[in-house]
Amino acid sequence: MVLGAQLRRLRESAGVSRADAGYQIRSSESKMSRIELGRVGFKERDVADLLTMYGVDDPAEREAFLEMVKQSSQPGWWHRYSDVIPTWFTDYVGLEESAARIQTYELQFVPGLLQTQDYATAVFEHGGMQSGEEVEQRLQLRLRRQKNLARPDAPRLWAVIDESVLFRPIGGPAVLKAQLGSLLEASDIPNVSLQILPYVNSGYAAEGSFTILRFAESELPTIVYVEHLTGSIYLDQVKDVESYGRAIDRLAVDSMTPDESRDYIAKRRAEI
């Protein structure tokens, strides 16, 4: 995505149309669009031809771009789980890995990045997993994703959780109680913010769960991820991103404050 965004910037600075750029690499305008959005792979020859067309002659600058091509073709760690996760989710894991800020609203479950092992196992086992091995691999992927919150350059996670999640006995009362205890621990992590959306305010700002991924690189667009039963959609158009941005802001206003949320989670845990 970074490479595609930089190629788009160079093309626009050179005054070259997307159609002409596509013709230069023996491709179409639509293919060029996908390249600039980072949604298809890159070939070194194509990037070299585009750099020439855009007037990039400095050897060091050209080498930096071609090195990015090599890096972009290297599979991420999550690809080892490609046999057990749907293709439409693979892209999300890569984006989540690169995000500087993750804003999520969850209506049904504890967010995946905050799920305990037992809670996640219960979600997978009741979600149509075909075998114990598949459940185990999905679990290991989830636990590996959670490590991102503890790395030195960890993203900022801001999660708004519907109050109903605290009452839904995923895995049974003992598993839910342990999960709520884990949420209390997570609320102490400096880069994690949790807010509980009360029943009385639920359903007004958003009709379903969604996640907003924001990146430190200015060239990268903010991505809204919305998952459904058989797939997902990725939104990056400004009007869509702004609509979801207003929704998450409204959800934050309608929710308990982080301190109030922590107290409520502790109270709910004591009731189980």
Image (tube, helix red, strand yellow):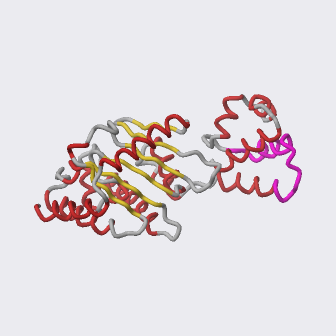
Q: Quadrant of the C terminus?
A: bottom left
Q: Decide if residue 41 is on the left or right side of residue 133.
A: right
Q: Residue at x 30, y 58 (%)?
A: 257
Give above or below for 171 relative to 35.
below
Magenta span includes 51: yes
In the rendering, at what x and y percent does residue 187 appear?
Answer: 33, 65
- Residue 164: x %, y % from top left: 21, 48
Residue 113 vs 3, above or below: the answer is below
Dividing the picture into quarters, in which one does residue 13 lie?
top right
Instruction: State the residue in front, 78 or 53.
Output: 53
In this rendered view, identify the residue nearer to me: 166 or 138.
166
From where the camera sits, is residue 124 visible? no
Q: Residue at x 58, y 56 (%)?
A: 216
**Residue 148 percent coordinates (x, y):** 46, 63
Tell me residue 127's x, y (percent). Answer: 27, 44
Residue that lies at the very extreme toward the front in this rendered image: 253
Kindly identify the residue that appears in the image at 33 percent across and 66 percent down: 186
Looking at this view, is 168 or 81 the one in front?
168
Q: For this view, does 113 lie left or right of residue 178?
A: right
Q: Main secondary structure of the magenta part?
A: helix
Query: Within the magenta stretch, is there residue 157?
Result: no
Range of residues picked out in magenta = 42-62
